[in-house]
């Protein structure tokens, strides 16, 4: 037996290779130099970020689109603290992620000491598991456990810290990575399937809400077949976008806007709501069942959470695709979609059509969204940052496949889209990747343009320019009838972008946007497009939606 000694850092890198990790996003520090050095010569590619927060977002979005835990790393103290937001975002969005940081040596943890805080306790509220390697012999077990816990349903973030002195301790090479084993989701109970089918067959006006769990399960084909067999309308959460193709005649678009939107009216008259892969952090159950009087059929890999407006008439726990296929066999088709469904589809189509017809500049957000959709292929991926831009993209950008319109909605974090696009592009280099951001969120992590340039990762960033925190202004105007402390000045985005060595475009006429998008998406470089947007449409939209009660 070969008993040549290696250290904990080298063993950790072997464990990461064993888990199939391809990329580590992070920034080195004094206390993790052995770990960083051990990556050299391994199969892992280290992506040096310009901030730890951005590194965590890269890992976050990599995990979101692959289902494999994205990995980020940092040093102790301030480096680990900077990881926290991206880690929390992943956990809130049910995304697999493993964060690794250094820690002060065990030889000084018992006393007040330089750069020490209790990182395990700090990460506990925003992870599924938060651990520290104290015994070098436990390294393989703790790394395997972190990936297993992170990736199993319900996925989320795990944290592992390595004290500086532990990282250097030698271990025998008979301490090797543990075998990777995955657990399959169980088959659904046929008794529960038949009970749910009975409820649906006796219902007058069922409707479906599809959420993030269905997107993670790649349940599109089974969902479409179920919808067509029952002849029922389907709305999606922001995270569920694309699981039901939004060009399908049974699609009602998305739920989750801050006021009563088109799809909400479909739920108002429903007697049964089938929630497929829906998770409560996506939006409150009161939005679909405000009087707690509807029968809820819940289909997911794990039992439903408790909520006063989410009383389950029948739960089906198990593989989502298998559950839908079995349920499809037992349901009877309803005569046709309701008049409310057709009204919703007509309103959505009209709003998109009106947007396409506008030639104004600054551009109407509806026109910008329409041009984005025309420029992107069905498999291309757009990351929509948080702000007013999120509301327009989530509502009006038709997604045709799961995880092709990525939104932060559990934590609703600003500034994830630009660094996140780097992670997505590394996961799917053959797809075109677009980050759509407001000017406020763009400036929070714009330094990662340099990362994309240095690492030769071609992405496109489209900035909605309005020199304001537009969503907060919108909310203030809606509720307070005035706004304050939301306006700011921007740099010259063209000069700023070009200073990184990236390609820059400024939209000065509405007809420039679509050809510019196509040109930028076809280029093998980093491109930034600054597009002035007319957000006076925000208030017009909420006024319009408020007038729809009489229409329905």
Image (spheres, rainbow, N blue to C red):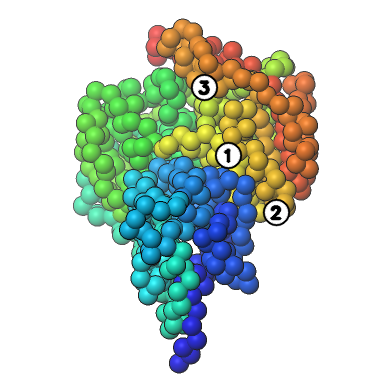
Query: On residue 471, which mark appears?
Result: 3
On the image, numbered disc 1 is attached to which residue? 417
Secondary structure category for the residue under label 1: helix
Circle 1 packing at 10 Å, graded few (<14), some (14-19), many (20+), is: many
Q: Is residue 213 above or below residue 66?
A: above
Circle 2 packing at 10 Å, graded few (<14), some (14-19), many (20+), is: few
Q: Position of residue 283 (x, y in %)?
A: 37, 32
On the image, numbered disc 2 is attached to which residue? 455
Q: Position of residue 386 (x, y in %)?
A: 52, 31
Q: Is residue 363 above or below residue 437?
A: above
Residue drawn at point x = 49 percent, y = 20 percent = 472
Q: How many marks?
A: 3
The N terminus: image quadrant: bottom left
**In this orientation, which residue lies closer to the viewer: 492 or 326?**
492
**In this orientation, which residue lies closer to the viewer: 337 or 432?**
432
Q: Position of residue 281 (x, y in %)?
A: 36, 37
Can residue 483 be seen? Answer: yes
Q: Upstream in the sequence, badge 2 or badge 1?
A: 1
Q: Upstream in the sequence, badge 3 or badge 2?
A: 2
**In this orientation, which residue lies closer to the viewer: 510 or 69?**
69
């Amino acid at each position: 037996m070969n008993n040549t000694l290696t250290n904990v850092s080298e063993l950790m890198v072997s464990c990461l290779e064993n888990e199939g990790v391809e990329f580590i996003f992070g920034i080195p520090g004094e206390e993790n130099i052995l770990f960083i050095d051990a990556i050299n010569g391994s199969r892992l590619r280290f992506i040096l970020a310009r901030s730890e927060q951005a590194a965590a977002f890269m890992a976050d979005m990599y995990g979101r689109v692959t289902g494999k835990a994205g990995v980020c790393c940092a040093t102790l103290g301030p480096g680990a603290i900077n990881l926290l937001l991206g880690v929390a975002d992943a956990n809130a969005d049910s995304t697999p992620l493993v964060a690794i940081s250094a820690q002060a040596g065990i030889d000084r943890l018992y006393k007040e000491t330089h750069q020490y805080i209790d990182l395990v306790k700090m990460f506990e509220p925003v992870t599924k598991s938060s651990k520290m390697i104290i015994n070098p012999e436990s390294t393989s077990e703790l790394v395997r456990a972190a990936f297993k816990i992170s990736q199993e349903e319900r996925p989320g973030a795990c944290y592992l810290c390595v004290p500086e002195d532990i990282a250097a301790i030698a271990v025998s090479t008979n301490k090797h990575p543990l075998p990777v084993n995955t657990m399959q989701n169980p088959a659904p109970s046929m008794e529960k399937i038949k009970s749910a089918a009975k409820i649906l067959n006796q219902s007058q006006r069922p409707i479906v809400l599809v959420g993030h769990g269905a997107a993670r399960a790649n349940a599109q084909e089974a969902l479409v077949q179920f919808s067509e067999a029952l002849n029922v309308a389907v709305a999606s959460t922001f995270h569920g976008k694309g699981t039901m193709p939004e060009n399908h005649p049974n699609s009602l678009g998305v739920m989750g806007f801050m006021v009563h939107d088109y799809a909400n009216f479909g739920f108002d008259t429903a007697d049964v709501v089938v929630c497929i892969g829906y998770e409560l952090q996506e939006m409150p159950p009161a939005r679909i069942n405000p009087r707690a009087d509807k029968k809820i059929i819940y289909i997911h890999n794990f039992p439903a959470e408790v909520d006063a407006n989410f009383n389950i008439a029948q739960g089906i726990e198990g593989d989502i695709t298998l559950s839908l296929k079995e349920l499809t066999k037992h349901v009877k088709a309803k005569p046709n979609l309701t008049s409310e469904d057709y009204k919703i589809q007509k309103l959505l189509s009209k709003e998109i059509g009106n947007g396409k017809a506008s030639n104004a500049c600054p551009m109407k957000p509806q026109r910008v969204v329409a041009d984005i959709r025309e420029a992107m292929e069905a498999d291309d991926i757009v990351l929509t940052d948080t702000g007013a831009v999120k509301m327009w993209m989530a509502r009006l950008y038709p997604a045709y496949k799961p995880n092709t319109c990525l939104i932060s909605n559990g934590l609703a974090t600003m500034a994830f889209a630009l660094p996140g696009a780097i992670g997505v592009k590394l996961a799917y280099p053959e797809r075109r990747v677009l980050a759509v951001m407001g000017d406020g969120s763009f400036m929070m992590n714009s330094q990662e343009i340099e990362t994309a340039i240095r690492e030769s990762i071609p992405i496109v960033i489209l900035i909605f320019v309005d020199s304001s925190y537009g969503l907060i202004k919108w909310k203030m105007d809606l509720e307070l009838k005035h706004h304050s402390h939301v306006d700011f000045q921007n740099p010259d985005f063209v000069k700023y972008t070009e200073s990184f060595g990236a390609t820059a475009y400024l939209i000065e006429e509405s007809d420039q946007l679509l050809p510019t998008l196509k040109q930028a998406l076809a280029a093998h470089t980093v491109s930034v497009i600054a597009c002035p947007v007319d957000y006076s449409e925000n208030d017009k939209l909420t006024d319009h939606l408020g007038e729809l009660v009489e229409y329905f």
